[in-house]
Image (cartoon, rainbow, N blue to C red):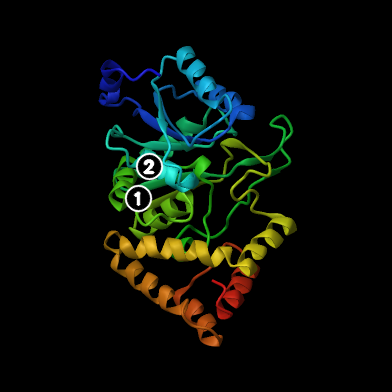
Amino acid sequence: MRDTAQERGTDMTAAGETPLVTILMGTRNGAPHLREQLDSLARQTQSRWRLWVGDDGSTDTTRQILTDFAASVPQEVRLLDGPGKGVAGNFLALLCHPDLPPGPVAFSDQDDIWYPHRLARALDRLSEAGEGVALYCSRTELGTDPDRPRATSPLWQRPPSFRNALIQTVAGGNTMVLSEGGVTLARSAGLDPLPAFHDWWFYQLVSGSGGKILYDAQPTLFYRQHHHNQLGRNRGFAARYARFGTIWQGRYHHWITRNVRALQRNSHLLTAENQAILAEFAALRRCKGPQVIAGWQRLGLHRQGRLETALMAGAAMLGRI
């Protein structure tokens, strides 16, 4: 893999020049669709990028595909061994790597297809937002065949907020780009304790710190659906049924617990208002009964849909959240 001092020396961005973006990708036995994803990176209209890949013990041809891709593009491609701690652990290990260059960071799955404008559009939005902590994210087109997408991810109507982020993420990590300030924030939070999902964590951390969430209604990639997806689709009856299945089975409670522990460990990074919201939310999770619903209403905790907010508040009343 190319990783020369000369290439690393391109980090400095001249005045008015588009910043160099570091793309972080997590892989594990991704050979079936990896080359399509890599080719879509090469087709980006914004060509100032480098790719860092954390491979979590692939036993197929994933590493060879990455080696071949590195030889075919002028950009830096660096392959690192993943920590073997799941998807969140892999991405956060890359983000917190001591040699990570400065600048914005984009996140990539191993099996999607980025549309050519994906990076350029994100950087334009981040530039418009000015300096500071910001997180760009977007909608996606979904399906099994990129030539015939079956659906588009939901168009959320309520603005992103920490009160929403505590119980829901508004976008997948495969659409996210952190500003340089957002990268600094996430790196300062570190790796321990490990949250449930890296994308949910970035939404919580940036919104909780008072940073900007830049939600783009235009899809910027094709999100491939299959049984290996960590979360998959987020709309329709089947998705809603599966989501409440995770609540009944206790998995959602486990995810929330991991997120709350990570937020409590990093509460100094949150605004005073959001520190108070987090403290009361954590206290409500130790309670049952109608007082929990009253507490949720007082805090303004919500999902993007009113029905799902009501159903989740009911689950919280039973101690399932």
Of mark 1 and mark 2, the one earlier in the sequence is: 2
CA neighbours of label 2 inside 10 A, class few (<14), some (14 to 19), many (20+): many
The residue beneath circle 1 is 191
Which is more toward the observer, 54 or 17? 54
Tell me residue 124's x, y (percent).
42, 35
Quarter in which the N terminus is drawn: top left
Quarter in which the C terminus is drawn: bottom right
Q: Residue at x 56, y 25 (%)?
A: 40
Tell me residue 232's x, y (percent).
63, 48
Q: Residue at x 73, y 41 (%)?
A: 150
Looking at the image, residue 126 lies above or below residue 293: above
Q: Picture quarter containing residue 246?
A: bottom right
State yes or no: discs 1 and 2 in contact (Cβ < 8 Å). yes
Tell me residue 94's x, y (percent).
38, 38
The residue beneath circle 2 is 93
Q: How many marks?
A: 2
Tell me residue 148's x, y (percent).
74, 33
From the viewer's perspective, is 182 left or right of 115? left
Q: Amino acid at mark 2?
A: Ala
Q: Residue at x 39, y 44 (%)?
A: 92
Q: Picture quarter containing residue 15?
A: top left
Element type at mark 1:
loop
